[in-house]
Amino acid sequence: MQERKKKIVVLSGAGISAESGIPTFRDSNGLWEGYDVMEVATPQGWAKNPALVLDFYNQRRKKALEVTPNRGHEILAELEKDFDVTIVTQNVDNLHERAGSSHVIHLHGSLFESRSCQDETLVYPIKGWELKLGDLCEKGSQLCPNIVWFGEMVPLMDVAAQYASKADIFIVVGTSMVVYPAAGLINYVSLDAWKYVVDPNLPDMKPMPLLKMFAEKASTGMEKVREELKNIR
Ligand code: NAD
């Protein structure tokens, strides 16, 4: 009889894409590429100046298309050979998918989708890098980037929590663990599950069993996690 593959759930944040050349914004005083996040990543910002918000996300999309996944993303994709891997990412780029990960949940939305301002269930792929004022949904209202803005509900949180509760191994990589509800995902993980944290600035975490922390960049830290996993496959 074939043994079931152990389940790995990964919570990734902006830090995993840093080595690909996409900056985090917590490292630059709440500015995201020089923009105040409240102006460009909130419903109020969109209501005030949609042209600025569209331009901001167009630039992020353009940048995301120019860069490539790094070793951190690649190792997570390679783990699918021996494990059943689900990635829960706070990132809006598509570097996990481009590295080869086949099951990625985008908690905070995706740069490569638009949604209707009038009906949030109308979601479309974005081809290329630009979404413009005047690009309309099938009901005739403006399209905005399909991003979960600060202050909004996170619709996929329940699904992510279900996966976290069934994880045999939970890996946190490149996130400050201060953005909620995503940071609360670890509270759903079983006490019996192994937990690994990779971040050069280790987040404050309450003590818990089977927790190992690596104060490393995603690329080198994930190599170490992979070594650890060889013993618990
Ligand atoms: P965050 O709260 O997840 O913090 C970034 C973390 O990355 C920090 O703890 C930092 O120490 C760590 N880090 C920096 N360099 C690293 C490296 N080389 N390897 C591993 N970890 C590293 O993220 P944030 O920047 O505060 O962003 C908050 C939200 O903004 C995200 O959750 C996301 O929705 C959005 N965002 C997305 C992207 C993206 O899609 N790539 C980039 C910036 C921000």
Image: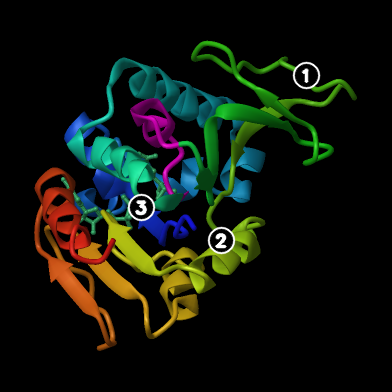
- Reply yes or no: does residue 147 show up in magenta: no
Q: Is residue 14 left or right of residue 151?
A: left
Question: In the shown orientation, is residue 148 left or right of residue 29?
Answer: right
- Residue at image point 26% right, 54% down: 174
Q: Callout 3: 10 Å neighbours few (<14), some, many (20+)? A: many
Percent across and percent down for residue 103 are 51, 42
**Above or below 33: residue 203:** below
Near mark 1 (Cα within 10 A), the count class, few <14, some 14-19 or many ≥20, is some
Image quadrant occupied by the C terminus:
bottom left
Q: What element carries label 3?
A: strand
State the residue position of label 2. 160
Query: Sequence order check: which comes first, mark 1 or mark 3?
Result: 3
Secondary structure, mark 1, is loop
Q: Can residue 23 be seen in this view?
A: no
Identify the residue under disc 3. Answer: 12
Say which amino acid is labelled 3. Answer: Ser
Q: Residue furthest front?
A: 1
- Identify the residue at the far top of this view: 128
Which colouring convention does the figure follow?
rainbow
Image coords of residue 81 (percent x, y) = 35, 41
204, above or below 67, in the image: below
Residue type at mark 1 is Leu
Say what amino acid the circle numbered 2 marks. Ala
- Mark 2 or 3 closer to N-term? 3
Q: Residue 136 carries which label?
A: 1
The stretch in magenta equals: 87-101
Instruction: Tell me which residue sits at (25%, 48%) in the image.
Output: 15
> Could you tell me if residue 84 is visible in this image?
yes
Please state which of the two labelled residues, at mark 2 or mark 1, is closer to the viewer. Answer: 2
Q: Are marks 2 and 3 in contact (CB under 8 Å)?
A: no
Tell me residue 122's x, y (percent): 79, 33
